[in-house]
Image: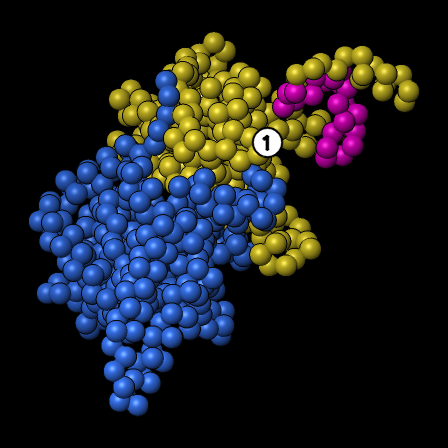
Chain colours: A blue, B yellow
């Protein structure tokens, strides 16, 4: 398991506690006082570290290599998932997955940006950076949902759209724009969840919904903090400051009215307990869909558009 | 050439402008030295090689709209600083500087006008205003312009030019992509045409939203149009050079992402003909 700098003291204490427990068991000695003390200390340390995460630390958690990805959530939250492939124009993009699944009692269309676990899979899935085919596949599946009255769940997790030569030649910008337009008028409920990274237009291309939820340690912004640092500060060293300035955390975006609801993660982040994270998200999604499925499609679309029209802060 | 350099120094003004104030201008395309007055007459297109100089909002209003027809709307609308953003400079200072330099309050000017007698709702972006970047002010003005087009039953014509979404407003800028694109569904429902003219350069969040959603997409020759900028692509792929003509208007036309590439000197005529067909 990969360990982030600020996780290290916690992990070390956990290891110490584990060792002590094993020792007590093997030797049959009573160390319960000592163990209880360490447990309290561990609890306190976890609270201390995770109650005041900096925005940059959250970015690191959002990118944690053990963090649950779209398929990890789909497999844990749904049953009978059938993956559907291809955009029907050019190809099938492994950076975007999607298909039909049952969430609770309800059939849904679920789409997601999919990172790879390990180098080989990551190369195949382009680290979750979609090509135009990915956005077009997502749109095709969303339209399928609308046609058969199935709600759409979109799991966003990408550093950004893939900046490749072929991606540009096949209309990366057009594919994203077309999705923004299409999602704004899709006559079925759409619930978006930013599960990890919400990198710019590449994320938003699957991010227009009636409800936009965000996992507690996800980030979502117009640009990644490193790129922002190199453009505005002309230095790669200011990523922490950029992360701060961009207001990219779930709590910040809730305040700005961009995100409707923050989904709590298990203490220590979703990677410490993927089962728990998926269980919480499933409950939340069922509740969100319950509230949306009976709204007439025209009303749903009207409200969805109004919600995005309200976004922004200006002076006049 | 000594006399020429002296002359340049003699007339240099202090304010930084998009277009050179000098009497003589060197073409960035072919290197030809051109007389400024002549260049103005040819709408800032090099008469020798056809190179399109970058021009600003005032020039496009003069070139495309019938004389005196532009009636500006929402001109007072400008950027706030919702994130209290400060990098090497304060965002409020950047905005103030841009307002002073361009003589306008945001990167998008909006209003009503006519093109060879055809009434239109008209928007023009200015790359000189923080790289023509789209923040909340641009998004809101675009939305109001579409509302106006719908309520007046006018076609929408927008001249785009932008480096993308504005970083200093964070995710609020990003959301303007969704806001503007969503609004265009209402223009479609009203069956009003939307023509977008993409000029050099149009990249990032503007291309990936309203600029690519026109019923008809026109670009000026040689305009750079794309999602990721060339520098980002080179860096990501570890390339020294990108293919010849990559992300240029002509290449997009070839790949099927534009309807036409039109010389600036023909642009008004082409727009008028299109509007004629639609109305």
Q: Residue A197's image quarter?
A: bottom left
Relative to A165, is A155 on the left or the right?
Answer: left
* Residue carrying label 1: B263
Q: Please say if A97 is above or below A17.
A: above
Query: Would residue B196 appear left or right of A291 to someone viewing this image?
Result: right
The quarter of the image holding the N terminus of chain A is bottom left
Q: Quadrant of residue A286?
A: bottom left
In the image, is residue B25 part of the stretch drawn in magenta? yes
* Residue A33, percent from left and from top: 25, 73
Quadrant of residue A25 within the rendered picture: bottom left
Residue furthest to the top in view is: B68
Residue at 50% across / 11% down in the picture?
Answer: B67
Q: In the rendered picture of this protein, how many numbered marks are placed on residues?
A: 1
Q: Main secondary structure of the magenta part?
A: loop
Q: Nearer the viewer, residue B235 or B108?
A: B235
Judge whether residue B191 can be spotted in this image: no
- Position of residue A61 relative to residue B200, above or below, is below
Magenta stretch: includes residue B149: no
Q: Point out the stretch of residues depicted in magenta.
A: B16-37
Q: Depth check: B200 or A262 in front?
A: A262
Q: Position of residue A310 (x, y in %)?
A: 28, 32
Q: Residue at x 61, y 48 (%)?
A: B231
Kindly give the residue lying farthest to the right in the view shown.
B2
């Amino acid at each position: 398991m990969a360990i982030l700098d600020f996780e290290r003291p916690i992990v070390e204490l956990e290891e110490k506690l584990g060792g002590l427990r094993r020792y007590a068991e093997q030797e049959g000695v009573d160390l319960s006082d000592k163990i209880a003390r360490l447990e309290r200390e561990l609890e306190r340390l976890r609270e201390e570290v995770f109650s005041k995460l900096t925005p940059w630390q959250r970015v690191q958690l959002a990118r944690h290599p053990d963090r649950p990805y779209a398929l990890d959530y789909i497999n844990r939250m749904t049953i009978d998932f059938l993956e559907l492939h291809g955009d029907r124009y050019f190809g099938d993009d492994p950076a975007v997955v999607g298909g039909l699944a049952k969430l609770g009692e309800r059939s849904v269309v679920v789409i997601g940006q999919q990172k790879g676990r390990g180098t080989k899979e990551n190369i195949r899935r382009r680290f979750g950076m979609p090509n135009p085919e990915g956005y077009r596949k997502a749109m095709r599946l969303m339209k399928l949902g609308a046609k058969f009255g199935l709600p759409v769940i979109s799991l966003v997790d990408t550093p950004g759209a893939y900046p490749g030569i072929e991606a540009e030649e096949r209309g990366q910008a057009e594919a994203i724009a077309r999705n923004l337009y299409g999602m704004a008028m899709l006559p079925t409920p759409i619930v978006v969840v930013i599960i990890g990274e919400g990198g710019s237009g590449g994320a938003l291309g699957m991010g227009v919904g009636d409800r936009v939820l965000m996992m507690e340690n996800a980030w979502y912004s117009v640009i990644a903090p490193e790129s922002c640092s190199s453009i505005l500060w002309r230095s790669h060293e200011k990523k922490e400051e950029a992360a701060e300035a961009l207001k990219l955390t779930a709590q910040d975006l809730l305040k700005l009215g961009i995100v409707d609801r923050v989904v709590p993660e298990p203490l220590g982040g979703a990677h410490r307990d993927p089962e728990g994270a998926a269980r919480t998200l499933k409950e939340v999604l069922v509740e969100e869909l319950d509230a949306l499925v009976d709204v007439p499609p025209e009303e749903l679309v009207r409200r969805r558009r109004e919600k995005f029209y309200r976004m922004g802060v200006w002076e006049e | 050439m000594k006399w020429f350099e002296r002359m340049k120094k003699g007339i240099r003004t202090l304010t930084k402008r998009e277009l050179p104030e000098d009497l003589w201008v060197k073409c960035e395309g072919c290197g030809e030295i051109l007389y400024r007055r002549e260049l103005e007459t040819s709408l800032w297109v090099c008469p020798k090689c056809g190179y399109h100089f970058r021009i600003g909002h005032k020039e496009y209003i003069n070139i495309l709209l019938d004389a005196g027809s532009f009636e500006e709307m929402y001109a007072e609308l400008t950027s706030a600083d919702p994130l209290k953003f400060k990098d090497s400079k304060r965002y409020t200072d950047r905005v103030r500087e841009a307002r002073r330099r361009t003589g306008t309050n945001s990167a998008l000017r909006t209003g009503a006008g006519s093109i060879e007698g055809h009434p239109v709702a008209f928007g023009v972006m200015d790359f000189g205003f923080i790289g023509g970047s789209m923040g909340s002010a641009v998004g809101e003005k675009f939305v109001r312009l579409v509302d106006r087009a719908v309520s007046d039953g006018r076609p929408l014509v927008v001249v785009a030019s932008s480096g993308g979404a504005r970083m200093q407003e964070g995710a609020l800028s990003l959301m303007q992509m969704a806001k503007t694109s969503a609004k265009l569904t209402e223009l479609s429902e009203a069956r009003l045409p939307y023509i977008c003219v993409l000029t050099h350069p149009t990249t990032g969040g503007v291309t990936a939203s309203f600029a690519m959603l026109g019923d008809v997409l026109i670009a000026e020759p040689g305009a750079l149009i794309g999602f990721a900028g060339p520098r980002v692509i080179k860096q990501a792929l570890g390339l020294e050079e990108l293919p010849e003509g990559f992300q240029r208007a002509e290449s997009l036309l070839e790949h099927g992402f534009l309807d036409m590439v039109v010389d600036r000197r023909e642009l008004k005529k082409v727009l008028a003909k299109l509007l004629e067909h639609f109305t």
